Image (spheres, helix red, strand yellow):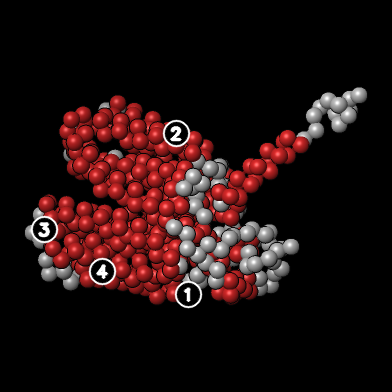
Amino acid sequence: MTKGVNAGGRLDRLPISRFHYRIFALIGAGLFVDGFEIFLAGSILGALVQSGYSDLAQNARFISATFVGMLIGAWLAGVAGDRFGRKFAYQANLLIFGLSALAATLAPSMGWLIGARFVMGLGLGAEIVVGYVVLSEFIPPQQRGRWGAALATCTNGALFVATLVGWVVIPHLGWRWMFALCGIGAMIVWFLRRSLPESPRWLETQGKSAEAEAVLAAIEQEVGKGRTLPTPAYQPAPVQPDVRFTRLFSRALIARTIVGCLILIGLNTAVYGFIAWIPTFFVKQGINLSSSLGYTMLMTLGSPLGTLSGMWIGEKIDRKPSLIVLSLAAAGLGLIYPMFINPVAFVVIGFLLVFTVAVMLALAWGLYIPELFPTELRMRGSGICNTAGRLMSIVTPFIVVELFTRFGVTGVVSVVAGLLVVQAIAVAVLGIETRKRPLEALRPEAMDSEASSAQARGKLQPSTGGIAGGGE
């Protein structure tokens, strides 16, 4: 007999419908604009220096302001999303980076632009945390792998689009129009996302049963038109409206928090400690800039292909073995990368490395991190993992410069490979398996109860001897 709202059971038994596609489109649009605004920096900074509006030192401050803002934004998004609701968090962050992007178009000085970029970073860091969490709470577990990885493709696809739009817009209209396009796009998505419902899972954990019931009834009515919905399984979610952040470090959740942080530290180091520096490494090794950009373009094609492949892998293969194998494969590719001198060989190895990291980004950011934490702590858990990753991305450039100066590319990739090996060990030892399991079944107490039941069944199973086994 079921009781209570049963938000998880009722959502998880829904067939994929126009409702899910609308949720995905609006969240994906926000993440695409988020990615576009992050990646436009590469095109804009060059134009700022060329026009005399900025210099290299100011550009460095611009980049630092972005990452510091994203670090703080990731943390604040976690707090706001668990405290005030998913809808508040995903609308607030869009409004923040949309309005600050529009303010950047009016920047009278580089100092103004750096300040606006810091505020943009608050929203940019928040969107990455919010988007993946919200989608995970609406998509049924049997489909979560494919849809979460598809969402990561929205973010990664923005790299190519931002580069192409910058190539067309900046020479003819100027760099301000890049911020204007981004700000206008963010405000359009903000307006459209007002129709997104609050997460019934979150409402249930906050004790807001009437609101959860109203949202679920509306979703079921929309999805159920012309069809009979399956009977939901009962997936209890306890009412816990005021859970302290420190529970993430309790005995029940500390292992998950460590795994999530180590994964995003490893991936941020791989992205910002190697992939982002590929053109510089080429030039420093004597390859001319034109060839360097061409090689880089070929290698970075691995990014969208990797996230698309993540859709299949996330659906068909368990999370733990996938992340372990991919981490070790990326570490191995990184270590052998400096050994090749032939351009074809190092482009192929580089492509495979970018591809492997992109698959991990899809599986980790899009799927595994949100799945690790219970609903009442999901935003804060994802937020602290992203905060750890962003903190690493702030210090990584300084580490890379020091390593490259002392030991060359070999020193850089050795450190990145080492972190990826640590990541693989952490997932193997401390990680849990989450694929195709209801979010409520991944709660620590539910998994402990399941393990105890399995152990009890094993002890009660008849032996092969005696009467039960057919003996005397």
Residue 374 percent coordinates (x, y): 52, 55
Give the number of the mark in front: 1 or 2: 2
Q: Amino acid at mark 3?
A: Ser
Question: Which quadrant would the N terminus be assigned to in this image?
Answer: bottom right
Distance, label 2 to label 4, CA atoms, is 41 Å
Q: Residues within 10 Å of mark 1 (few under 14, many from 20)?
A: few
Q: Which residue is mark 4?
A: 100
**Could you say which is closer to the camera, residue 51 or residue 358?**
358
Q: Secondary structure at mark 2?
A: helix
Give the number of the mark in front: 2 or 3: 2
Q: Amino acid at mark 2?
A: Ile
Are circles 2 and 4 on residues that touch, CB within 8 Å? no
The circle drawn on residue 195 is: 1
Distance, label 1 to label 2, CA atoms, is 42 Å
Are circles 2 and 3 on residues that touch, CB within 8 Å? no
Are circles 1 and 4 on residues that touch, CB within 8 Å? no
The circle drawn on residue 425 is: 2
Distance, label 1 to label 4, CA atoms, is 23 Å
**Would you place residue 180 above or below residue 44 in this image?**
below
Among the two numbered marks 3 and 1 on one chain, the one whose residue lies closer to the N terminus: 3
Residue 196 visible? The answer is yes
Residue 461 percent coordinates (x, y): 77, 35
Among the two numbered marks 3 and 4 on one chain, the one whose residue lies closer to the N terminus: 3
Q: Which residue is mark 3?
A: 54
Among the two numbered marks 2 and 4 on one chain, the one whose residue lies closer to the N terminus: 4
Q: Amino acid at mark 1?
A: Ser
Q: Residues within 10 Å of mark 4 (few under 14, many from 20)?
A: many
Please tell me which residue is depicted at 47% across the width and 57% down the height of the picture: 377
In-image side of 40 versus 353 (left or right): left
